[in-house]
Amino acid sequence: MELSAVHIAITIGAIEADRAPAWWIEGRRGDPLGRVGVTLPDPAGTLHETLQPGNPLTIEIGYRDQAAVTWSGTVIMLAPGETRDQIEVRGCNAALPLSRTIVTQAWENETPEAIVSWAIRTAGLSVGHIDPTGVTLPRFVASACSVWQMVQQVIESCSRQFGLNMSRRALWMGRDGVNWSDGEEPGDMPLIATGAGLIRHEPGVSRTTLSRIETWLLPDLDHSRLVHLQDVRRGIDAIVTAQRVRHEGAPDRTRTFIWY
């Protein structure tokens, strides 16, 4: 049975659709690129002639009585669908220039946050929230590397030269621009509780394994957001940071999965 409460509008190049056999949207803290996959029917096998990498891709999704959330990006590849008469279109979000813009530059006596801000602007993106580090790098060189790789080198320099704990520092595309921060993305904190949205909760089996929450579709949620989890069966009442968020949909089912 098709879900009537969930609205979806897909635009890929010149193709528009209000349904799809399957779709997913995923973001991970520590990976600057948000990713998407949309499966489209292709009985004639001709969509690969119509669609191509570089096409704009937009998905509007939400509940019919609420404002839709818009995900925008670029097609990066076409792949076979689950059946022979389908094709999957895969894309990345607007943060793609972070992995494709190559920089070569040198600095002396400059702060890490100034260097990272310069790199974000060089990629043609807006600077969001940048956490100060409190240090100055005596010398830093970026040589023919992507903005993303350069930022990782900045993190390594801060850790090695000054002993800073940079384990939580992440680079991601937020609502107000590209953030470089130890903190979280601003936004409402959803409550996922037993009897109120919690479908399944699988705690991690070790300190290094992420726990997973399965809930109904939360289209506005992305990684680096705070989530209030109440699992009565396990006696858990905690506020956690989403490290990975994946939304999945089909005509008869939608879910949001959260790893923390």
Image (cartoon, rainbow, N blue to C red):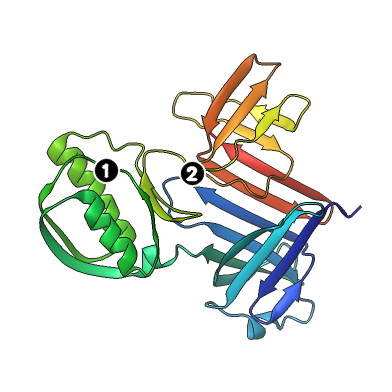
Q: Position of residue 79 (x, y in %)?
A: 61, 69
Q: CA distance from mark 1 to mark 2?
A: 16 Å
Above or below for 16 versus 190: below
* Mark found first going from the N terminus, 1 or 2: 1
Above or below for 227 versus 219: above
Query: Which label number is shown at residue 132?
Result: 1
Query: Which label number is shown at residue 30?
Result: none
Instruction: Check disc 2: other Cα within 10 Å, few if <14, some if 14-19, many if 20+.
Output: many
What residue is at 53 percent from the left and 29 percent from the top? 240
* Residue hosting label 2: 185
Instruction: Check disc 1: other Cα within 10 Å, few if <14, some if 14-19, many if 20+.
Output: few
Judged left or right of residue 199, residue 56 is: left
What residue is at 64 percent from the left and 49 percent from the top? 220
What residue is at 61 percent from the left and 18 percent from the top? 236
Above or below for 83 versus 223: below
Kind of element beneath mark 2: loop
